[in-house]
Amino acid sequence: MLPKLTPEQWAELHAQSFVATPQCWLSCRGGSCCNMNLVDDIAFNMLPTSGTTLIFMGDEYDYFKSRIEDMDLPAKEMRMDFGEDEDLRIVTAHCGLNGSCSESFPKPLLCKMYPFVPIVGLDGSLEGILSGSIYDWTYEAKGWTSFCPSMENNAFFLDQWTRLLNEIDILSHPYIIFHSQAIKVLYTDYVEHLRADKRLMELEGGRFWKSWELAYLTGKLFSMDSVKAKIKAVYRKIVHKETGAAGE
């Protein structure tokens, strides 16, 4: 199994500022990443558009629960069984603060790092950065200009991340590496499937988003067997590396 982070390691992780755009929601009409109601043409039938969805790694959420007394954050646990001793576990929670969150609010690392997420390689080095939400991935696949102005500064953010040697070192824990690599697997599979869907790629505006919502909710935008196989391969490499190092 993957090594666990200690509470002290989680605290050190969340003490980092990483590369975020301070008060970035002020540059896009009040937080389109934090409130999908502000994004033109998005009018889902089933997916929520008021506020946003926080995504915690499973152990990350457990850390906050143990640290914050009476944490009032209704959450939903999701597990992916990819055929190993443990599942890929994430916890999602609704956030309706629309960007007006304080430091006391339990923000997941994905929020702290947005708009780009660093991809940490198996050796602990920075492989690159990916945009930080499935909506950003969608804009990228469609070739649209993102609703997030910061997305235009990809080169700037990558340059900044390459300078954060201490932060990357802190992120090079096997548990974090595994989740980072899982994001890369999901991103690659999703973008490939969306671009291969000729009908969706031809649609624009509200017609696209309504069709996209149905395809997304019915699992047509991912090949889950392929995703699970690739995540399993990553997991085995990390565990092998850790057990091999422990036996040396």
Image (cartoon, rainbow, N blue to C red):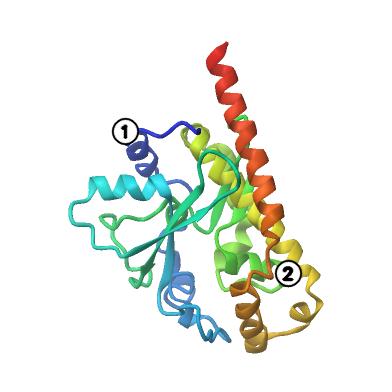
Q: Position of residue 193 (x, y in %)?
A: 74, 65
Disc 2, disc 1: CB below 8 Å?
Answer: no
Look at 45% across and 78% down and name the residue there: 48
Judged left or right of residue 154, residue 38 is left
Q: Who is closer to the viewer here, 232 or 8?
A: 232
Q: What amino acid does circle 2 point to?
A: Leu
Examine the image and state in which quarter residue 221 appears.
bottom right
Q: Amino acid at mark 1?
A: Glu
Callout 2: helix, strand or loop? helix
Residue 82 to residue 145: above or below: above
Which one is nearer the viewer's eye here, 19 or 243? Answer: 243
Disc 2 and disc 1: Cα gap in Å?
40 Å
Q: Few, some or many C-alpha atoms within 10 Å of disc 2 (few <14, some 14-19, many ≥20)?
A: many
Image position of 131 with respect to 46: above or below: above
Q: Tell me how many marks there are.
A: 2
Q: Residue furthest top?
A: 248
Counting residues from the N terminus, which is met first, the one under dot 2 or under dot 1?
A: 1
Instruction: Determine whether, in the image, residue 50 is placed left or right of residue 84.
Output: left
Element under disc 1: helix
Which residue, given by chain and number where applicable, does mark 2 sit on? 194
Q: Residue furthest left?
A: 69
Question: Circle 1 is placed at which residue position?
Answer: 8
Q: Quadrant of residue 14?
A: top left
- Which residue does the image show at 42% across and 49% down from the upper left? 58
Classify mark 1: residues with Cα within 10 Å, few (<14), some (14-19) or many (20+): few
